[in-house]
Image: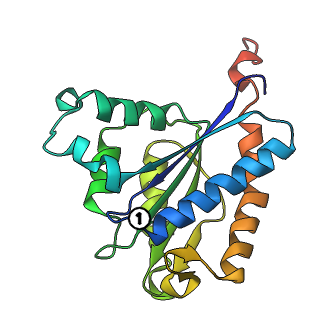
């Protein structure tokens, strides 16, 4: 791992402060800590759509985007590990979240590990990770990590994580995810495959 590992978190929340952003930030930091403990040099970046969303407003194609939006997409597309978190909004992720990812290059996230996370008012929305987020990133041929992290309003106090159970879930997701993330840093298999 000679090059720095780039961990980019995207919070799809439309508000600040935000429970979703708090969850994304915690996952970002926990993954960074785990990889640094293994000797990796790590760069972290948190993208809040509540701050950059207007850069994408009105654009119908990627050619319509300005430099700020292009820079945001570049950060997403070049991530070594992507952490995505969104609030449940009308049984799905927010329209802005989908709008931003509609501009991400179709093949730019191939084999990129992605940690999925979501927040909602109650535990009844927990399956959003499996029904909405995982299919989206499967389309990109990304590697979605096995344990998604869902948090409800009861897991927070003043937009900060307050639940020990949520912290345990985050720890479990990181523990199970790091070996998979680490495996993506090796050379592509195709370089070792000889002609048949």
Q: Which image quadrant for residue 23?
A: bottom right
Vertical arrangement, residue 195 with respect to residue 22, above or below: above
Residue 105 at what x, y percent from top left?
38, 32
Residue 69 at what x, y percent from top left?
30, 35
SS label for mark 1? helix
Q: Which image quadrant for residue 15?
A: bottom left
**In the shown orientation, is residue 66 left or right of residue 19?**
left
Pick the residue in front: 35 or 90. 35
Q: Kindly identify the residue that appears in the image at 42 percent across and 85 percent down.
A: 121
Q: Kindly identify the residue that appears in the image at 40 percent across and 70 percent down.
A: 87
**In the shown orientation, is residue 7 left or right of residue 118?**
right
Q: List the residue tagged with mark 1.
A: 132
Q: Kindly identify the residue that appears in the image at 76 percent across and 59 percent down.
A: 176
Instruction: Report whether residue 179 is seen.
Output: no
- Few, some or many C-alpha atoms within 10 Å of disc 1 (few <14, some 14-19, many ≥20)? some
Residue 40 at what x, y percent from top left?
79, 35
């Amino acid at each position: 791992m000679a090059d720095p590992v780039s961990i980019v978190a995207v919070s799809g929340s439309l508000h600040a402060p935000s429970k979703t952003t708090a969850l994304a930030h915690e996952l970002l930091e926990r993954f960074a800590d785990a990889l640094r403990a293994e000797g990796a040099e790590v760069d972290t970046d948190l993208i809040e759509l509540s701050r950059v969303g207007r850069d994408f407003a009105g654009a119908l194609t990627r050619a319509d985007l300005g430099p700020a939006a292009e820079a945001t997409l570049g950060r997403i597309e070049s991530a070594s590990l992507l952490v995505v978190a969104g609030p449940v909004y009308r049984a799905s992720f927010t329209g802005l979240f989908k709008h931003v990812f509609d501009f991400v290059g179709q093949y730019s996230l191939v084999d990129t590990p992605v940690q999925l996370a979501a927040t909602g008012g109650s535990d009844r929305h927990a399956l959003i990770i499996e029904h909405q987020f995982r299919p989206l990133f499967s389309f990109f041929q990304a590697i979605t990590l096995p344990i998604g992290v869902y948090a409800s309003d009861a897991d927070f106090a003043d937009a900060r994580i307050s639940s020990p159970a949520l912290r345990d879930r985050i720890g479990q997701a990181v523990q199970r995810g790091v070996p998979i993330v680490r495996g993506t840093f090796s050379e592509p298999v195709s370089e070792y495959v000889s002609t048949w």
